[in-house]
């Protein structure tokens, strides 16, 4: 079918895999503009002004895994490793929520099992005692028992990517890990009642547009509440140091197609897109179907060491402001209110 007909069809029926591939394959300016604008229209129609600001606290950069692309991998040398104490973590969240108005916080780390399930549950419990906030855990693979404990302690969501739905590619990038185990754990978390944020990396070696279509279909079939897909960025301390970064254009196409397929999902602009596109990344993402942003709340003294990839964009809030709060994509009034809340 013609490109524009596919865009129209998404209003009345599920798009077929071939159609998704067709959308993702375009490099025509006119088609891309039409798709981004359609995604933005759907976002406005289905979510109105719903817009979400997330904060992330990166509390440890130790990791037992060895993912080939990640700067935190076990074998990465020259990484200054740090662990925040439970009190430091609780206080960072407390400050963001009670003084700056954040309502959703992601607690992220490498797969650092020195924070036992009891320690993490204790941290969650303390935060919940002190403030009203939606807590997302992004701590990697643990037992489902561990996730059950964290849920009981008050955790609300997980940010847990399957990274790629191409099993052979998954296994080549994640030594010692199993794709099926990762998906099974994700499904268990969903059953436990976690709010699910999941997704994949764009621009992995050998990844095809068909793989990316399958990645988006996988997110939808999991029934995820939030889509998180960002470009791979090469890191010097990894075996993938010279592999080229994922493209911003593909990232925006993925954002738009995800919005077409999942009209009500939360879709953040990922930090990685902001990193490869600088300030423009946010504006572009928000005009292509995304509806949330993530700000870094990791204490200054640790921030530079959470080096998943180099030159990580650290949310320059002033620039966001300078842009006139993305007048053209979101209600000015709403954003202004959120801004005032989040950054006073
Ligand atoms: N350890 C947890 C886990 O694996 O789920 C959470 C932390 S992990 C560093 C968070 C995400 O960073 C991963 O899901 C991966 O997609 C992303 N990431 C890692 N290396 C990256 C790179 N070089 N470029 C872009 N994203 C990367």
Image: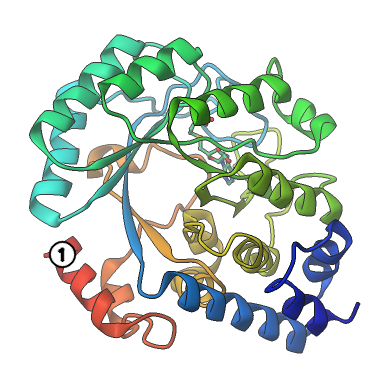
The spot of residue 54 in percent (x, y) is 33, 53
Residue 39 vertical position relative to residue 24 in the rendered view, above or below = below
Residue sitting nearer the eye, 315 or 143: 143
CA neighbours of label 1 inside 10 A, class few (<14), some (14 to 19), many (20+): some
Residue 57 vertical position relative to residue 43 in the rendered view, above or below = above
The spot of residue 83 in percent (x, y) is 30, 23
Q: Please indicate, yes or no, whether residue 27 appears anywhere in the rendered image.
A: no
The spot of residue 189 in percent (x, y) is 50, 26
The spot of residue 86 in percent (x, y) is 20, 22
Task: Provide the residue designation for mark 1.
Answer: 341
Quadrant housing the N terminus: bottom right
Q: Please indicate, yes or no, whether residue 93 appears anywhere in the rendered image.
A: yes
Q: Residue at x 75, y 39 (%)?
A: 165
Residue 104 vertical position relative to residue 130 in the rendered view, above or below = below
Residue sitting nearer the eye, 206 or 239: 206
| Snapshot quadrant of residue 253 | bottom right
Q: Residue at x 35, y 74 (%)?
A: 49
Q: Quadrant of ligand 1?
A: top right
In this rendering, would 153 be left or right of 29? left
Quadrant housing the C terminus: bottom left
In this rendering, would 286 be left or right of 32? left
Residue sitting nearer the eye, 42 or 37: 42
Q: Which structural element holds mark 1?
A: helix
Q: Residue at x 89, y 61 (%)?
A: 18
In this rendering, would 268 be left or right of 320? right
In this rendering, would 283 be left or right of 88? right
């Amino acid at each position: 079918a013609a490109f524009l007909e596919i865009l129209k069809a998404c209003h009345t029926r599920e798009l077929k895999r071939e159609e998704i591939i067709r959308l993702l394959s375009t490099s025509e300016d006119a088609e891309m503009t039409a798709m981004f604008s359609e995604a933005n229209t759907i976002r406005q129609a289905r979510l109105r002004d719903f817009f979400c600001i997330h904060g992330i606290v990166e509390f440890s950069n130790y990791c037992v895994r060895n993912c080939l692309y990640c700067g935190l991998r076990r074998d990465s040398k020259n990484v200054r490793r740090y662990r925040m104490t439970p009190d430091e973590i609780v206080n960072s969240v407390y400050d963001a929520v009670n003084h700056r108005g954040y309502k959703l916080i992601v607690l992220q780390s490498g797969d650092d099992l020195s924070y036992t399930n009891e320690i993490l549950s204790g941290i969650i419990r303390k935060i919940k005692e002190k403030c009203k906030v939606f807590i997302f855990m992004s701590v990697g693979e643990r037992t489902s028992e561990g996730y059950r404990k964290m849920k009981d302690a008050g955790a609300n969501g997980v940010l847990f990517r399957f990274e790629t739905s191409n099993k052979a590619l998954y296994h080549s990038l994640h030594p010692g890990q199993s794709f099926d185990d990762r998906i099974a754990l994700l499904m268990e978390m969903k059953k436990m009642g976690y709010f699910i944020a999941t997704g994949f990396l764009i621009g992995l070696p050998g990844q095809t547009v068909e793989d990316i279509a399958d990645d988006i279909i996988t997110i939808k079939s999991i029934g995820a509440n939030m889509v998180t897909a960002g470009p791979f960025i090469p890191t010097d301390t990894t075996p993938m140091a010279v592999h080229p970064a994922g493209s911003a254009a593909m990232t925006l196409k993925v954002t738009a197609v995800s919005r077409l397929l999942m009209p009500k999902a939360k879709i953040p602009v990922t930090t990685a897109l902001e990193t490869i596109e600088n300030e423009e990344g946010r504006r572009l993402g928000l005009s292509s179907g995304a509806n949330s942003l993530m700000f870094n709340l990791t204490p200054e003294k640790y921030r530079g060491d959470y080096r998943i990839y180099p030159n990580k964009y650290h949310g320059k809030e002033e620039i966001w402001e300078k842009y006139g709060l993305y007048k053209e994509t979101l209600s000015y009034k709403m954003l202004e209110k959120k801004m005032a809340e989040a950054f006073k």
